[in-house]
Amino acid sequence: MTELTAYQAVNQYFADAAHTIDLDEELFAVLTTPYREIAVQVPVRLDDGELIVVRGYRVQHNGARGPYKGGIRYHPTANLDEVRALASLMTWKTALVDVPFGGAKGGVEVDPTGMSEGELQRLTRRFTTSIKHVLGVYRDIPAPDVNTNPKVMAWMMDAYSAVNGYSPAVVTGKPLDLGGAPGREAATGRGCVYVLDAHCTHHGRYLKSQNVAIQGFGNVGSWVARELHARGVPVVAVSDVGGALVQPAGLDVPALVAHVGSGGSITTAGGGDVITNEELLELDCDVLVPAALGEVITEANAARVRAGVVLEAANYPVTPSADKILLDAGITVIPDILANAGGVTGSYFEWSQNIQQFTWKEERFNSELLDRMQGAYRFTQAFAEEHGVPLRQAAYAIGITRVATAVRLRGYV
Ligand code: GLU
């Protein structure tokens, strides 16, 4: 069977869930069509004088429940189909955790590794200027995603504010000194652990007794590792693009964070055996956390996954044919739109604080995050049990129902 494109795949997940809730044809058509798609030219002058011209995209998938919301990624394989798929995931994700946003995503088809700060800043400003007419505090609010970070968000906020006046709430995931919220940077990874904790509780298991392998050690993967380690949960393997490190007794996560923070790679950190990323995905462990890019568990390797639970910290790490193989093997998948929704939930907290000009302490941020993430898990789990469907189908069904209700109330159909 040939694999689907990312957008076809997400719509396949959508269709499975739509069937569960008997979604009518008109709503099906509205909800599987993105509202607006922008593709722009982004010329960037490199430090050596050369000019590169790359493509940038912003897809606003559905805004029935609130302003469009979703990250911006910089990656050489970013393309319109993938951005469309990721924008659609944001629509179901924001609805599932019930934050008042729609779904959007952006991407620039560029390899930022090795680019200087000046080059990255010029790229970011040019891209922001090209899409600024569709952004806005109550219109569309970007955030970090793969290869973007608070610094990039600060440049976006500045480029937008230069034209529209001071607008901190137009992007989230900003630096703390520029309207960022304490807790936001860790929120995606922490949220994953809150959900895993609720899953363990539901099944009468101890979180502490789970061995966890994490693919990816960027913002999300490293915070999953830190939060687990802080709770005494053994992190038995982690990886970055160069390879993985495995230690059955549990890795020294703070040492890894320090090593990577000072520019080192995972495979040179010591404290474990070096294996490949592919081998990490096939480790015999309790919980496997894909926390890097999409489509890492496919029809080609799904049958070799030996974890009991796959916690999708990344967006779209498991293709539909792989999902079926995992299901048939009795492996539970905790889907992206639930597992990693802590990021956008934290963005909602940041955005609200910016609008109210009232700041929260990190304790409040984390406790609200915990409530919302574990509440969403329990709601999804209950739906799954009631309808006899996997968690992904339940999560989509809940999200779709909420968006469909808003679409009807607003009179789109
Ligand atoms: N990029 C993150 C995600 O995929 C966060 C999006 C946001 O906060 O808007 O969920």
Image (spheres, rainbow, N blue to C red):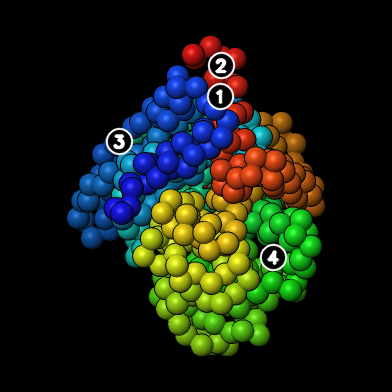
Q: Position of residue 291 (x, y in %)?
A: 52, 61
Q: Nearer the viewer, mark 3 or mark 1?
A: 1
> Which residue is found at the position 68% from the left and 76% from the top?
234
Return the residue at label 4: 227
Q: Residues within 10 Å of mark 1 (few under 14, many from 20)?
A: many
Mark 3 / mark 1, whichever is N-terminal: 3
Q: Residue furthest top?
A: 411
Q: CA distance from mark 3 to mark 4?
A: 38 Å
Mark 3 sits on what residue?
Answer: 39
Q: Position of residue 413 (x, y in %)?
A: 49, 13
Q: CA distance from mark 1 to mark 4?
A: 35 Å
Instruction: Report whether 215 appears left or right of 257.
Output: left
Name the residue that disc number 1 marks. 404
Q: Mark 2 highlights which residue?
A: 408
Residue contact at pointers 2 and 1, CB within 8 angstroms: yes
Query: Does the closest atom of ligand 1 sit within 8 Å of the Cβ of label 3?
Result: no
Q: Could you say which is closer to the camera, residue 163 or residue 241?
A: 241
